[in-house]
Image: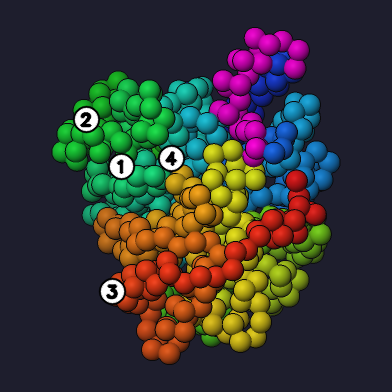
Amino acid sequence: MKLNDFKEIENYQKEREKKELDFILNLTQESFEDKEKEKEWNKLRTSFALYTEGRIKDTYMTRPRFFESKIDIEDFEYLLDVVQKYCDGRLHLTTRQDFQLHGMKKENLPKILEVISKRGFFTKATCGDSTRAVITPETTGFEEEVFDVSPHARIVTDYILNGREFMHLPRKYKIAFSNKEENSLYVKINDIGFQAVIQDGKKGFRVYVGGGIGPISTNSIVLREFIEEDEFLYYIHAIRNVFNDHGNRKIRARARLRYVLLNLGEEKFLELCNEYISNFYAEKGDSLKIYTRKLLEEREILDREKELEKIKIFSSEENTDESIKNDEFLKNEKNIVAGKYKGEYGYYLRPARGNIYKEDGEKLIEFVKNLDYKVELKLTSFQSILVRGLKKEDVLKLKEIMSEYYGGNEFYSSYSCIGSTTCNVGILDTPPILDYIFEFFDNDEKRELTNYLPQIKVTGCPNSCATPQIARLGFSGRRKKDGEYFAIFARGEFSGKTVKLNENLGEIKANKIPYFLEDIANIIKNENIEFEKFANEDRFLGLIEDYKEIEIENVDFNEFRKIDAEKAW
């Protein structure tokens, strides 16, 4: 692949994706009337992000790809209009830096795919047994960091979409980049991850491999302490080859790359990876390094132009850790983050259930369009949007306009997976359960207690889309004869070269969770201790045991489900 610059890549990409779009459009259309074509379509559709929804709905979901987790306000407005016309009226934020479109009738699928493609949105390889969205911190390129990893994510995304080599794998293949140690958690829990480091004055990456979260979770192990900045494509492709050749294609529950690591052990797994890396270098020579270096240099020129524009708006003086610590504007506001330049801020929008509907979407559109300078919208890994590059006075305006999108403390930024009403493999419908928890604390006395609680992450099955294994406090659902239960996850350690994932500490019935949280909050408040300290004490386990005996009236979560049903599905 010999391309001159990013503009040429974009043109090539559109042409390439148009061919893939035509393929899935034609196959979808043919599946309506031809049974054999329908069988073929059902085999391939998930790789093009066409999923059936739930067990009680005859609808589909799709997930477009977002480069560098960015969305322009015009594209946001366009997608918001699409979901009003063809879907269930919401844009749903996921835990992997993208939007999902829900509630699509099968007969509308060709039209929807065609309509979103007009704005450059394609669905190839965003789902199914493919290489998923490339994760980067939503703050990279915005904050003080080792270096901006957005260009690297863009290069990888284009590379994996060139053909179908990164599709039809044993299962999904996940890639992450981090811009500094503080944001490196995802590189340490993905199939392959790259942490930005500088060694002897050279930009490069520490490379991690073999991580993943699910029924059996593992943290990644270090594959290389340092590779140069232009070498990452060799590693991504070589490890893809390891996965393709050695991943379990017979048992889907054991098909992820981490099971190759678990089966072989660290030493033999690293030997295997190194063998594949050597072979791939021998095959490609310096071609990928030359290609990558050229693109990085061209991107650097483009980004420098953007930086000069920012300096005009804000200041040439850059923030430091010290200046951020002393910024009074940041101290009492969890949703505000400092940018690279003095006077530059970002603001997180955290919609309930990750759903953005027409009214609130239009508020955001109007706000952004009325600014006399450009801002960026970045999708996060925790069902939110970071609006980057705001002046202080505009942060306050946005906060007021979108006041319902922020609960005021860490606990109210808690989130769940999308739940079994929509997800076919889900066991429990988690959004109504999270609503029940929030309603429990919806009075002045109990709301004050939430200031002592951590963010919680609630997932409805062992697939762990809401990542309880890396939460301060996580819950993972399962169903028993007498009702809905949640395993409780805590005691992880997420700093250091490798991480320790949360432990499963026991389980609690769903209707008891708010009372359990209330007890935790009272202990933390009365004893003035940190949640992590309490969670690591024996009495935390004792509290979980106590709740096995405590009887609490059952809850009909359908009542909470009905509220959302008025807006969606």
Q: How many angstroms separate mark 2 from mark 1 (CA)?
A: 12 Å
- Residue 479 image point, x, y percent: 50, 49
Return the disc, 1 or 3, that comes first in the chain's sequence.
Answer: 1
- Residue at the right extreme of this rendering: 85
The residue to which callout 3 is attached is 538
Q: Secondary structure at mark 1?
A: strand
Residue 174, numbered circle: 4
Q: Is residue 37 magenta?
A: yes
Q: Is residue 333 above or below residue 474?
A: below
Q: How many angstroms separate mark 4 from mark 3 (CA)?
A: 36 Å
Return the disc, 2 or 1, that comes first in the chain's sequence.
Answer: 1
Query: Residue at position x 71%, y 72% from top?
Result: 403
Q: How many angstroms separate mark 1 from mark 3 (CA)?
A: 34 Å
Q: Which residues are magenta?
A: 32-55
Q: Give left or right: position of 265 versus 461.
A: left
Q: Is residue 391 above or below residue 213?
A: below
* One can see residue 467 in this view: yes
The residue to which callout 2 is attached is 272
Q: Tell me the kind of residue under disc 1.
A: Val
- Neighbor class of circle 2 (other Cα within 10 Å; few <14, some 14-19, many 20+) is some
Return the disc, 4 or 3, that comes first in the chain's sequence.
Answer: 4
Q: Is residue 274 magenta?
A: no
Q: Secondary structure at mark 2?
A: helix
Query: Residue at position x 60%, y 15% from top?
Result: 40
| Of marks 2 and 3, the one in the foreground | 3
Q: How many angstroms separate mark 2 from mark 4 (CA)?
A: 19 Å
- Residue 274 image point, x, y percent: 22, 32
Residue 209, numbered circle: 1
Q: Secondary structure at mark 4?
A: loop
Q: In the depicted view, which residue is nearer to us: 168 or 368?
A: 168
